[in-house]
Amino acid sequence: MSAGHAHAAARGHSAERAYAHQFDSAEHQHGAAQLGMWVFIAQEILFFGGLFVAYTVYRFMYPAAFAQSSHHLDVVLGSFNTAVLIASSLTMALAVHGAQLGKRWAQVIFLLATIFLGCVFLGVKTIEYGHKFHEHLIPGPNFLFDGDARHAQIFFSLYFVMTGLHALHMVIGIAVLGVLVWRAARGAYGSAYYSPVELTGLYWHFVDIVWIFLFPLLYLIGRH
């Protein structure tokens, strides 16, 4: 067999492996993967929804303490991180578009840009956590607060749990994006097969939307 025939055979084999044996077609596999991701996102909405309900209940019970606590958050850094995440949603969408068009290096560049922006967000969040540590605003025996400290601890407990879980989701997303970059650089995704890039995009947009809700609830309450 000539080198050209061997290459053509390899491409044909790759096309056959574009979908697993339990699916009838690549479209069938793509639809199943999308359904699975939406089910996953639905359970994530329920998960974060419980935290939002807890926040709403406690804010209704202790509005003054929550408003006073919110003023200890850095709204400038929070606004900056909001802009960073919105930009990362744009680069992620462009990476998906590049995959759909079969543009290998566009995928790689925009995926790397998304990773960079995600790391910027986490870096800023680390700075914010550091400030709270030095200001003794970590709930616990060393908590110091000029005001209703007992109920302020509830606010900061919710702040660290909600933003910490959001940051954990971003760390997982960045790790998945790293794998996508490695595979995209080797031509794994193109117009015939781009499900991993598209599904990761859905996950990333969901994480961004969670922050869009967290930012005003935590940073902007009680501000005029």
Image (cartoon, rainbow, N blue to C red):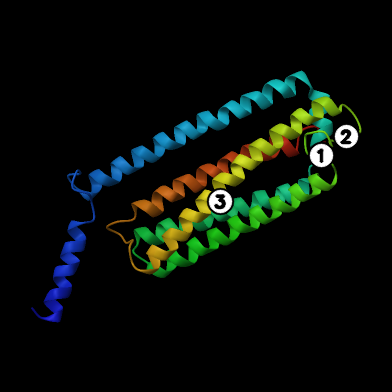
From the top left corner, tell me how far across and down residue 188 is, in percent. Answer: 33, 63
Instruction: Check the image and report above or below for 200 versus 224.
Output: below
**Extreme bottom residue here?**
2
Count of residue discs:
3
Secondary structure under badge 2? Answer: loop
* Residue at the disc numbered 3: 171
Amino acid type at mark 2: Phe
Instruction: Check the image and report above or below for 21 versus 47.
Output: below
The numbered mark, 2 or 3, whose residue comes first in the sequence reads: 2
Which label belongs to residue 212?
none
Amino acid type at mark 1: Leu
From the top left corner, tell me how far across and down residue 224 is, in percent. Answer: 82, 36
Question: Which one is nearer the viewer's eye here, 174 or 113?
Answer: 174
**Extreme front residue here?**
141
Question: Which one is nearer the viewer's eye here, 44 or 88?
Answer: 44
Amino acid type at mark 3: Val
- Residue found 27% across the figure and 58% down from its top: 192
* Residue at the disc numbered 1: 137
* Residue at the disc numbered 2: 145
Do the residues bearing badges 1 and 2 touch, measured as CB atoms within 8 Å? yes
